[in-house]
């Protein structure tokens, strides 16, 4: 956020007489969200693996617990279904991240 505040376009907008609230919303927040959106969209696989770990350790009933039970019992159809679900979540998370980056960064719209 501090790097964005020191950038040339924020300095130009400040000297141009724009209000600080408009500058913060239009320039600073939009440009500082780009790395955060990329980080979250690329970390979907680690989020899923942590869900599986938490459900296995604390014995919550969920898809992670179903996955662990399928691995232990060698239940291949259930294992394939949960792996498909996890893969679908990672792909959809990446797509949502890509669409959010295009929405926030005008340079990517071309």
Image: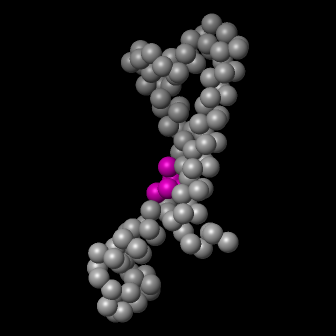
Is 39 magenta? The answer is yes
Q: Position of residue 94 (x, y in %)?
A: 60, 48
Quadrant assignment, res 91: top right
Q: Main secondary structure of the magenta part?
A: helix
- Boundaries of the magenta span: 36-40
Closest to the observer, 58 or 41: 41
Closest to the observer, 58 or 62: 62
Q: Position of residue 5 (x, y in %)?
A: 37, 77
Quadrant assignment, res 16: bottom left
Q: Residue at x 53, y 38 (%)?
A: 46
> Quadrant of the image for the C terminus?
bottom right
Is 17 magenta? The answer is no
With 89 as the anchor, is 58 left or right in this view?
left
Quadrant assignment, res 86: top right
Q: Residue at x 69, y 21 (%)?
A: 80
> Quadrant of the image for the N terminus?
bottom left
Q: Name, please, the residue furthest toward the left.
A: 20
Q: Position of residue 2 (x, y in %)?
A: 36, 72
Q: Total label count?
A: 0
Q: Residue at x 50, y 56 (%)?
A: 37
With 18 as the anchor, is 92 left or right in this view?
right
Whether residue 4 appears in this view of the structure is no
Q: Is residue 87 above or below residue 41?
A: above
Whether residue 98 appears in this view of the structure is yes
Q: Residue at x 48, y 32 (%)?
A: 50
Q: Is residue 70 above or below residue 96?
A: above
Q: Is residue 73 above or below residue 30?
A: above
Closest to the observer, 70 or 85: 85
């Amino acid at each position: 956020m501090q790097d964005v505040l020191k950038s040339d376009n924020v300095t130009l907008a400040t000297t141009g007489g724009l209000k600080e609230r408009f500058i913060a919303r239009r320039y600073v927040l939009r440009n500082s969200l780009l790395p955060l959106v990329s980080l979250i969209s690329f970390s979907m696989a680690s989020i899923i693996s942590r869900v599986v770990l938490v459900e296995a350790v604390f014995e919550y009933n969920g898809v992670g617990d179903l996955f662990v039970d399928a691995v232990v019992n060698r239940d291949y159809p259930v294992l394939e279904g949960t792996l498909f679900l996890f893969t679908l979540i990672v792909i959809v998370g990446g797509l949502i991240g890509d669409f959010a980056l295009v929405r926030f960064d005008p340079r990517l719209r071309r």
